[in-house]
Image (cartoon, rainbow, N blue to C red):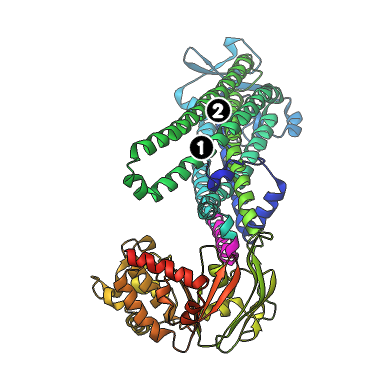
C-alpha cells in the first residue's frame, strides 16, 4: 500500500480522553449553543416519553374510566360529579386519599356493562336486582367526564407533537450550525498551520495525505459533533427516562423488562468487536483504492502509451473485489445484529404481554399500564442500537483527530525572529560564509561553501545533478535553515530578517511552473489587489508573454485549467516570468527556468532577461550553458563543494570542470 494512505489503517482507541479533551476545546467558544441544544434535547426526550404516558392515562382514566368506583353523595356535595336521580356521583380518584376516610358512609358504585347494556350498581355487589339500568342519555352523562378528558389529552398530545417538531428543528439547526463552525475552525487551523510549515515537512509527507487530513478527517469530526456528541445525551436521557417511568408505573414489570439487558449487552459487545475488525479492514482497503486511483489517473498518459490499460484494470478489479467482500461482511454483520436485537425486543414484549396480560385479566394491573410498558420497551431498544452503531463514528473520529493533531503538533517551522529586521529596500548583496547544509542528519549537501554576489551582478551556478545548486536557492529564500556558517543579505544574517519580507523581495522562477485554476491574470496577480491590470499587461509585454496571451479567445481572462494543462511548457514559463516580475523583486532567481523551453520561446525570454536583470541581483541555475555565457560570474559546484569560479571565458581557459561540461554539451548539441 502507498505510504500516502498507510496510516489510514490505524484506528486507535474507540475513546481517548486526551484527544476528546482537545476536541472539546474547539467546542468551548460555542458552549452556550451546545448547552442550548442539550436543553432542547432534554425537552424533546421528555415530550417523546410523555406520549406513551398520555395514552396510558387515556386508556385507564377515560376509555375504561366508566369502570372506576364512584361515591354516591348528596346533590349538594362540594365535589364535581355527575347528577343522576337527585344524586351526585363522584369518582374516588378525584378525591385525595387522605380525604376519603371522611366519606366511608357513602356507598361506592360503578357502571357495569352486561349484554350490551349499562347498569349502575354496588361496586362490591354481584346482585343484579340492586343495579339501575342506564339509558343512552344517562350513560352519556356518566361518560361526559371521560369525553372531556380524552379531548384534553388529545389536545396535549397534538401540542407535544408540534412542540417536539419545533424543538427538534431548532436543535438540529443549532447543532449543525455549531458543528460546521467548529469544523470550519479546525479546517482553517490545519490549513494555516500547513502553510506555516517548512518546505522540509512537505519533503517527507505526501500531498495526498495532507489533503485527506483537511477534507476527509475534518468531515469525520463533523459527524462526531453532530451524530455523537449531543445525540449521546439524547440516548442516555431516553434510557434513564424510560427506566424511571417504568419503575414509577410498576416495579415488577420494570424489573421483568430489565432482565433482558444482559442479552442486549452481550450482543452489543460481540457486534462491536466484530465490526471494529471489519471496519478497520474496509478503511484500509478503501485507502488502497484511493491510492491506486490517484496513481493511475495521474499516470494515465504513461499507461496509455505503453498500453497497460487491461493490466491496470485487472489490478484495480482485484482491489475493488477485496473491498466488496469486506463490505458484504459488514452488511452481513449488521443483518445479524439488528434482527438479533429485534428478537430480544420481541422476546421482552412477549414476556410483558404474558405476565402483564394475566395481571390485567385478574384486575391486578390496568390495561393502560401494560400498553405503556410495551411502548416504552420498544423505545428502550432504539438508543441502544443507536449507541452501538455510533461506536464506529466515535472510533473513526478518534483516529482522525489523532492524525490531525499529529500535523498541528508538528513544529517543523522556520521560526521568525522575535524582533525581525524589516529593511526599507534590499540592494541585493548576497554572501555565503562557510555554509554547511544537510536535509537529514550529516548527509551534507553543501560543504563549507563561501562566495559573495554583489548588488546588480548576474551569477550562475552550474554542476551535475545533486551538486547542490537548487539547495543554494532554497537557502537564500530561507525555505531551510543551515546547520553551520552564515548567509548574509546586505550584510545582515537572513535569520534576523522577517522571513515574509525577505521572500517578498526575492522572485523565483522554477523549472516546473505551477499554475493555479483561474484565469491568466489571476495567475499573474496571485490575489494581490495592489497589482493593477495595467501592471499585468506591462510585465506580460516585458517578458513577451503577451505574444501568446493576445492570441487566446479571452486574452487575460482566459481560463487556466488545473496545473495549466492547456498551455505549453514555454507559455507556462513566460507566465511564471510575468508573475515574478509583477512583484518587482530586488533579487531574481532562475532555477533552470529555460531548460524545458523551445528555441523560439527561449529567444523571447533571453530578450526579456537582458532588460529584467538590469539593476537587479540575478542568480541563474542552468544545465544549458548557452543561457549563462554572459553572466558576471559562474560558480561550478560538485558534490556540495565549489570547484571553480570565474566568467565563461575564464573557465573555458582553465580547461577544468566547466570546460568538460561545456564540451560535453556542445557535442550533444552538435549531434542534434
- Is 207 inside the magenta-drawn segment? no
Q: What residue is drawn where x is 54% and y is 26%? A: 333
Q: What residue is drawn where x is 56% and y is 25%? A: 337
Picture coordinates of residue 486, whole percent (x, y): 67, 77
Can residue 274 be seen in the rendering of this structure? yes
Which residue is tagged 1? 285
- Is 193 inside the magenta-drawn segment? yes
Judged left or right of residue 275, residue 547 is: left
Check disc 1 and report its element: helix, strand or loop. Answer: helix
Residue closer to the observer: 94 or 515: 515
Picture coordinates of residue 142, whole percent (x, y): 53, 28
Q: Name the dominant secondary structure of the magenta segment.
A: helix
Judged left or right of residue 245, residue 514 is: left
Q: What residue is drawn where x is 62% and y is 10%? A: 126
Please report the bounds of the magenta region as a residue range: 179-200
> 389 above or below 562?
above
Q: Are marks 2 and 1 in contact (CB under 8 Å)?
A: no
Q: Is the C terminus in the top left, top right, bottom left or bottom right quadrant? A: bottom left
Which residue is tagged 2? 59
Amino acid at each position: 500500500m502507498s505510504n500516502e494512505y498507510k496510516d489510514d489503517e490505524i484506528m486507535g482507541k474507540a475513546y481517548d480522553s486526551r484527544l476528546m479533551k482537545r476536541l472539546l476545546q474547539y467546542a468551548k467558544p460555542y458552549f452556550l449553543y451546545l448547552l442550548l441544544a442539550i436543553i432542547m434535547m432534554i425537552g424533546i426526550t421528555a415530550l417523546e416519553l410523555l406520549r406513551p404516558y398520555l395514552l396510558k392515562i387515556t386508556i385507564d382514566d377515560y376509555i375504561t374510566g366508566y369502570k372506576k368506583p364512584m361515591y354516591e353523595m348528596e346533590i349538594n356535595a362540594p365535589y364535581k360529579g355527575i347528577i343522576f336521580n337527585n344524586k351526585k356521583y363522584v369518582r374516588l380518584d378525584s378525591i385525595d386519599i387522605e380525604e376519603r376516610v371522611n366519606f366511608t358512609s357513602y356507598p361506592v358504585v360503578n357502571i357495569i356493562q352486561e349484554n350490551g347494556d349499562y347498569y349502575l350498581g354496588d361496586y362490591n355487589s354481584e346482585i343484579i336486582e340492586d343495579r339501575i339500568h342506564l339509558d343512552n342519555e344517562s350513560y352519556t352523562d356518566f361518560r361526559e367526564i371521560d369525553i372531556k378528558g380524552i379531548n384534553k389529552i388529545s389536545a396535549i398530545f397534538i401540542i407535544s407533537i408540534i412542540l417536539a417538531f419545533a424543538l427538534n428543528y431548532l436543535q438540529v439547526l443549532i447543532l449543525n450550525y455549531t458543528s460546521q463552525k467548529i469544523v470550519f475552525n479546525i479546517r482553517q487551523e490545519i490549513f494555516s498551520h500547513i502553510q506555516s510549515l517548512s518546505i522540509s515537512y512537505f519533503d517527507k509527507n505526501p500531498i495526498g495525505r495532507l489533503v485527506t487530513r483537511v477534507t476527509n478527517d475534518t468531515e469525520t469530526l463533523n459527524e462526531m459533533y453532530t451524530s455523537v456528541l449531543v445525540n449521546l445525551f439524547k440516548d442516555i436521557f431516553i434510557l434513564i427516562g424510560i427506566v424511571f417511568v417504568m419503575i414509577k408505573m410498576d416495579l415488577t414489570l420494570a424489573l421483568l423488562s430489565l432482565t433482558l439487558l444482559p442479552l442486549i449487552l452481550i450482543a452489543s459487545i460481540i457486534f462491536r468487536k466484530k465490526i471494529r475488525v471489519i471496519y478497520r479492514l474496509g478503511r484500509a482497503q478503501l485507502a488502497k483504492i484511493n491510492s491506486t486511483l490517484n496513481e493511475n489517473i495521474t499516470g494515465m498518459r504513461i499507461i496509455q502509451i505503453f498500453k497497460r490499460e487491461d493490466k491496470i484494470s485487472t489490478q484495480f478489479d482485484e482491489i475493488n473485489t477485496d473491498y466488496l467482500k469486506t463490505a458484504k461482511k459488514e452488511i452481513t454483520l449488521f443483518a445479524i445484529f439488528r434482527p438479533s436485537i429485534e428478537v430480544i425486543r420481541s422476546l421482552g414484549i412477549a414476556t410483558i404481554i404474558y405476565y402483564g396480560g394475566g395481571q390485567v385479566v385478574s384486575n391486578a394491573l390496568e390495561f393502560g399500564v401494560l400498553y405503556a410498558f410495551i411502548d416504552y420497551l420498544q423505545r428502550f431498544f432504539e438508543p441502544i442500537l443507536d449507541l452501538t452503531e455510533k461506536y464506529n463514528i466515535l472510533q473513526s473520529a478518534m483516529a482522525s483527530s489523532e492524525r490531525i493533531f499529529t500535523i498541528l503538533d508538528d513544529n517543523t517551522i522556520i521560526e521568525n525572529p522575535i524582533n525581525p529586521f524589516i529593511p526599507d529596500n534590499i540592494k541585493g548583496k548576497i554572501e555565503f560564509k562557510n555554509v554547511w547544509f544537510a536535509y537529514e542528519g550529516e548527509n551534507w549537501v553543501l560543504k563549507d561553501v563561501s562566495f559573495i554576489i554583489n548588488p546588480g551582478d548576474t551569477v550562475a551556478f552550474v554542476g551535475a545533478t545533486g551538486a547542490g545548486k537548487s539547495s543554494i536557492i532554497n537557502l537564500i529564500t530561507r525555505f531551510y535553515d543551515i546547520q553551520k556558517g552564515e548567509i548574509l543579505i546586505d550584510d545582515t544574517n537572513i535569520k534576523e530578517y522577517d522571513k515574509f519580507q525577505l521572500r517578498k523581495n526575492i522572485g523565483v522562477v522554477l523549472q516546473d511552473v505551477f499554475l493555479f485554476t483561474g484565469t491568466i491574470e489571476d495567475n499573474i496577480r496571485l490575489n494581490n489587489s495592489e497589482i493593477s491590470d495595467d501592471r499585468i499587461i506591462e510585465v506580460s509585454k516585458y517578458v513577451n508573454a503577451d505574444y501568446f496571451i493576445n492570441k487566446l479567445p479571452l486574452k487575460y481572462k482566459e481560463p487556466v485549467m488545473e496545473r495549466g494543462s492547456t498551455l505549453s511548457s514555454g507559455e507556462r514559463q513566460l507566465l511564471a516570468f510575468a508573475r515574478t516580475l509583477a512583484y518587482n523583486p530586488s533579487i531574481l532567481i532562475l532555477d533552470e527556468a529555460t531548460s524545458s523551453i523551445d528555441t523560439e520561446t527561449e529567444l523571447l525570454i533571453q530578450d526579456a532577461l537582458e532588460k529584467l536583470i538590469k539593476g537587479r541581483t540575478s542568480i541563474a541555475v542552468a544545465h544549458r550553458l548557452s543561457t549563462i555565457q554572459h553572466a558576471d560570474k559562474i560558480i561550478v559546484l560538485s558534490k556540495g563543494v565549489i570547484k571553480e569560479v570565474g566568467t565563461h571565458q575564464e573557465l573555458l581557459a582553465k580547461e577544468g570542470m566547466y570546460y568538460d561540461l561545456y564540451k560535453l554539451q556542445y557535442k550533444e548539441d552538435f549531434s542534434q
